[in-house]
């Protein structure tokens, strides 16, 4: 596997090579310029074996344990995609990973964070200049991890890009099971805007962050915030399932999981000026993103009206 870092043929390490990371690895392998190898790190032997089956070199290692992995001597870039873990609002996982890199001096570290660090703004807009206000332990861990990534890069004169990412959806990450089980959604009147990004647009953002001379925080969302009810109804209509039943916030307390309720409680509108201007990524809207996802899953047939899918736009 090779990647397309401008002016460098060193190894790109993808730490936490799961749903997004595997698509990034495949995409980097398709680059023709400035080729270098890709090395994927995952926690389980099963994930490493699945990546290896695709020709992606992968090593199983646990950042919560010894974090033992071979650091490529020609390491030129790191993309970190593992979720945070650690007590007291700190991310001990990323600290162990960075420490395991030893004296390595890559040119760039891309840390994949979340828009959760902005906390609940009651639906108000946030951009990269908005001060973070994490509202729960997980968001505090994220902010702590961002700080660690930044300081690690400063000490090595490496470029640091922090991608604050909205909810990731894509093939096999759509609320199809919820729809098939007939689970309700929170009605629009009771929910704030939800922010999402199609996984392949996130992959494009990661690639641009590796290749372009950009540093600092970049928000990654599709710029089309819509609540749970609207997004789920879109999926239902496109896949041919009945529209979900809408419930009030009070009714949702008894039917939805604590995790989903916590997610729905926070509301903000994520603006992405740097994604478009500095990374050159214009994400697809939800209609095209859902169609693309269903098409890849073989659940979409015929020529869709309205927005074109990515395959159509690219003449595939
Ligand atoms: N899902 C969302 O809506 C969303 C939104 C914003 C940001 N994010 C963040 O974006 C990043 C990428 O998301 P994703 O959905 O692509 O993640 P994912 O599919 O869950 O992949 C995470 C990867 O990290 C590895 N990993 C987890 N714990 C590890 C450990 N202790 N040591 C070594 N590797 C470990 C996993 O290995 P195994 O495969 O072996 O388990 C997996 O390869 C994550 O940090 C996620 O929290 C997600």
Image (cartoon, grey):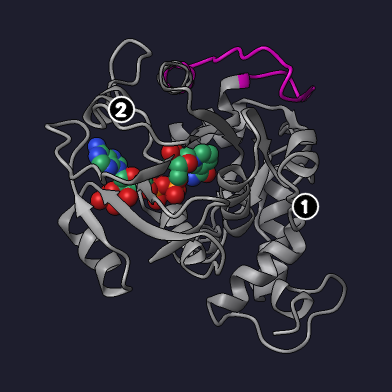
Mark sitting earlier along the chain (1/2): 2
Is residue 286 placed above or below 14 in the rendered structure? Answer: below
> Residue 241, how many percent across, how many down?
64, 72
> Residue 230, how many percent across, how many down?
75, 51
In space, the residues marked 1 and 2 are separated at their CA atoms by 31 Å
Image mark for residue 113: none
| Quarter that holds the N terminus | bottom left
> Residue 117, how many percent across, how many down?
56, 21
- In the shown orientation, is residue 262 left or right of residue 232? left
Residue 255 shows in the view: no
- In the shown orientation, is residue 116 left or right of residue 46? right
Q: Nearer the viewer, residue 120 or 166?
A: 166
- Is disc 1 surrounded by few (<14), some (14 to 19) or many (20+) residues within 10 Å? some
Which residue position holds label 2?
98
Q: Nearer the viewer, residue 221 or 15?
A: 15
Which of the 4 quarters of the picture holds residue 83?
top left
| Quarter that holds the C terminus | bottom right
Q: Nearer the viewer, residue 195 or 56?
A: 56
Ligand 1 within 8 Å of disc 1? The answer is no
- Is disc 2 surrounded by few (<14), some (14 to 19) or many (20+) residues within 10 Å? some
The picture quadrant for ligand 1 comes to top left
The part of the chain drawn in magenta is 118-147
Question: Which residue is painted at 17% across and 43% down in the image?
Answer: 69
Which residue position holds label 1?
282
Residue at disc 2, secondary structure: helix
> Residue 22, how many percent across, how many down?
41, 59
């Amino acid at each position: 596997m090779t990647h397309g870092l401008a002016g460098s043929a060193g190894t790109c390490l993808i730490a936490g090579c799961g749903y997004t990371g595997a698509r990034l690895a495949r995409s980097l392998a398709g680059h023709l310029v400035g080729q270098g190898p890709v090395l994927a790190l995952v926690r389980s032997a099963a994930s490493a074996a699945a990546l290896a089956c695709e020709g992606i070199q992968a090593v199983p290692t646990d950042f919560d344990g010894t974090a033992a992995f071979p650091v490529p001597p020609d390491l030129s870039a790191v993309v970190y995609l593992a979720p945070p873990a650690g007590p007291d609002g700190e991310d001990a996982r990323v600290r162990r990973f960075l420490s395991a890199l030893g004296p390595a001096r890559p040119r760039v570290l891309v840390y994949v964070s979340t828009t959760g660090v902005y906390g609940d703004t009651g639906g108000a807009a946030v951009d990269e200049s908005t001060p973070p206000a994490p509202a729960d332990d997980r968001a505090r861990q994220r902010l702590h991890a961002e700080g660690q990534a930044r300081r690690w890069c400063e000490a090595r004169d490496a470029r640091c890009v922090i991608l604050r990412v909205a909810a990731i959806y894509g093939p096999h990450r759509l609320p199809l099971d919820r729809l098939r089980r007939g689970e309700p959604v929170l009605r629009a009147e009771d929910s704030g805007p939800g922010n999402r990004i199609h996984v392949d647009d996130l992959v494009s953002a990661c690639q641009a962050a590796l290749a372009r001379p950009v540093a600092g925080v970049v928000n990654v969302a599709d710029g089309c915030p819509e609540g749970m009810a609207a997004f789920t109804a879109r999926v239902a209509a496109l896949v041919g399932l009945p529209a979900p039943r809408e419930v009030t916030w009070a009714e949702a307390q008894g039917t939805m999981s604590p995790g989903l309720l916590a997610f729905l409680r926070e509301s903000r509108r994520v603006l992405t000026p740097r994604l478009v201007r500095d990374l050159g990524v214009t994400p697809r809207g939800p209609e095209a993103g859902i169609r693309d996802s269903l098409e890849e899953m073989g659940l979409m047939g015929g020529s869709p009206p309205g927005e074109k899918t990515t395959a159509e736009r690219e003449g595939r």
